[in-house]
Every structure is written in C-alpha cells, then in structure tokens.
C-alpha cells in the first residue's frame, strides 16, 4: 500500500499519531490536520464498522439491497448507501489500457427513470419492464464494452451511441498501434477512422465471423452477456447509478466469482487495482 498523503493539502510528510476505533491515525506536518487511514475513501465516516466485512460478503455475491440489509441487520437505506459508496472505486478500476487486438461492441440497457422526480417523459419503471419500441431506441442507454485478447476490459456508459462519444471512450485506452475490431455499425467505423488506428470491420450481418483468421469480435461479444445477466437480478438500475454496475460485474467476474470480502473491501477503499492484467 502506498504511503498516505494528507487528504486536506496533499502533503506527504505524515507522522503516525496513535489509533482510534481500530484505525491508524496520522498527522500532517504541513497543515497539522489529523486523519485516519480511511480518510478520503468511500467508507470514510460510515458507521457500523463491525458489519462492513459482512456487507462486503453480500456484495461479492451480488445480493439485493433488501437481502443485504437483512443479512447484516441494518436498515435498507443504509445498505443502499453502502452499496454505492463501495461501488465508486470498482467503477474507476477498469483497465487503464488495452493491448494488441481489441474488440469493441455496444450493449444497451433500458432506461427506467428510477429515482428521478423531474424531466421525465413517462412514469418511472419500478421493476425493469420492457421498451415500447422494437430494437435500439432513445429508451435505452448505450454502454460501450472494449476488451483485448488478454482479458483487459473497459465499460463506458455513453450519452449517445455516436462517433464523438465512442471516440471519447476509446481514446484514453487505445494506443496508436492498437488494432480495433468492431461490427459494421457506422459509428464505430467512423470513430476508428477519426482516431487514426487500424480497424477491421466484421460484417456479422453477412455471417462473416472472422477476417484473415485473426480478427473477430467474438471475445467482446461473449463478454457482453455477463453485464446483462448481472444487471437482470436488480430489475432495473437508476440511470444515475448505472456506471458503477459494469465495474462491479468486472470486479467479481475477474476472480471467477471467488472474490473474498477482504479483497472487495480493498478495491472499495482503492488500495488495490485488479482490472489491469498486462503492463501498458
């Protein structure tokens, strides 16, 4: 674990200053602020410290808010607040870069308007529901999944499934020598052209699965079903909280559903990065 820095001024001259509630305390030599090891992390200032490990066990199993609250003997509002506190770092802990050949594909989630009070074109869907229109429409939220052959994966919630938004999602993780494979959709093709990277279009509509015996999108397409299956158990997720759920799915899936509660807490605190498999 890296040496702590002051959450108030960012100074790194830190001295130990006893402990409280089982946590190491520190004092900054610059601004004299005192803080503990969790300062500046999502679990900071949360109560029921003795129940965090039990709650992390519920998170590794993808349990609902109500089931988690019952198992940990806390109020459902507490369980809801803890879930989204703990999901913030896993959402950020995706792969920082993709190497070699990468495939990109869009998957779509129905927008439920859960939790919204204003600006809705219809009443919110409380338990998921179905779209009123067939195919892709403005009722759905696009999530761009990009995955290389080693398993490094990113998932970006897009405002729209257009060239500009796809470029914004892919530029930080693809280098100039990357090779991108997508289906024959116009937006991904235009995005690859704008970024100036090598691109191979896989025309799935014409039953073409592999080009030159190397280039395909089977890896990313197979992965697409994982977040879909993971999300189904929650019966619709509020748009505001949607970005955290693909990261949650990646975090649990990376360990092949054998993630320990302690490892989950380490990711939630932000002291471990488990999404990047290769050096970029």
Image (spheres, rainbow, N blue to C red):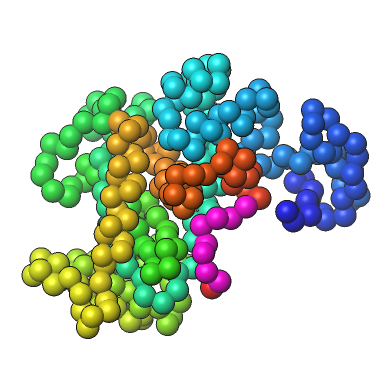
Percent position (x, y) of residue 78? 54, 22
Do we see residue 160 in this rendering? no
Q: Left or right: 26 with respect to 251?
A: right
Percent x, y for residue 252? 46, 46
Q: Quadrant of residue 257?
A: top left
Q: Split into 4 quadrants, where in the image is the N terminus?
A: bottom right
Q: Is residue 82 above or below residue 207?
A: above
Q: Residue at 46%, 53% (x, y): give it.
A: 254
Q: Is residue 78 left or right of residue 208?
A: right
Identity of the residue furthest to the left in this view: 206
41 horizontally vs 100: left or right: right
- Residue at left 49%, top 38%? 60
Residue 48 is inside the magenta segment: no
Residue at 32 percent of width and 56 percent of height? 223
Image quadrant where one finds the C terminus:
bottom right
Q: Is residue 211 left or right of residue 76?
A: left
> Picture coordinates of residue 85 (x, y %)?
56, 36
Residue 18 showing in the rendered view? yes
Residues drawn in magenta: 272-279
Q: Quick one: 97 or 40, which is closer to the camera?
A: 97
Number of labels in the image equals 0
Is 215 situated above or below 138? below
Q: Does the magenta stretch mainly form a helix, a strand or a loop? A: loop
Tell me, yes or no, whether the highlighted magenta stretch contains residue 276. Answer: yes
Q: Is residue 243 above or below residue 174?
A: above
Expressed as whole percent of the image width and height from the top left, the position of residue 199 reads: 29, 78
Examine the image and state in which quarter residue 170 appears: bottom left
Which residue shows up at 69% across the image and 30% down it?
45
């Amino acid at each position: 674990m890296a040496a702590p820095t002051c959450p108030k001024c960012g100074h790194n001259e830190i001295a130990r200053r006893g402990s409280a509630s089982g946590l190491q305390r520190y004092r900054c030599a610059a601004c004299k602020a005192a803080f503990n090891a969790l300062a500046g992390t999502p679990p900071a200032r949360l109560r029921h410290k003795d129940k965090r490990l039990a709650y992390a066990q519920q998170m590794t199993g993808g349990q609902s808010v109500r089931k988690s609250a019952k198992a940990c003997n806390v109020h459902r509002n507490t369980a809801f607040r803890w879930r989204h506190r703990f999901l913030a770092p896993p959402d950020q802990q995706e792969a920082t870069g993709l190497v070699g050949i990468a495939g990109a594909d869009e998957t779509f989630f129905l927008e439920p308007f859960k939790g919204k009070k204003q600006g809705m074109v219809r009443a919110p869907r409380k338990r998921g529901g179905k779209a009123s229109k067939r195919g892709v429409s403005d009722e759905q939220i696009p999530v761009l999944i990009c995955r290389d052959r080693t398993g490094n994966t990113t998932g970006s919630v897009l405002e729209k499934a257009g060239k500009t938004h796809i470029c914004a999602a892919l530029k930080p993780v693809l280098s100039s020598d990357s090779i991108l494979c997508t289906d024959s959709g116009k937006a991904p093709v235009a995005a690859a052209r704008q970024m100036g990277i090598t691109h191979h279009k896989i025309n799935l509509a014409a039953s073409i699965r592999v080009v030159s015996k190397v280039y395909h999108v089977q890896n990313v397409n197979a992965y697409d079903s994982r977040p879909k299956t993971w999300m189904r158990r929650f019966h619709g997720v509020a748009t505001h909280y949607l970005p955290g759920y693909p990261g949650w799915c990646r975090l649990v899936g990376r360990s092949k559903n054998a993630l320990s509660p302690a490892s989950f807490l380490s990711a939630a605190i932000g002291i471990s990065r488990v999404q990047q498999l290769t050096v970029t």
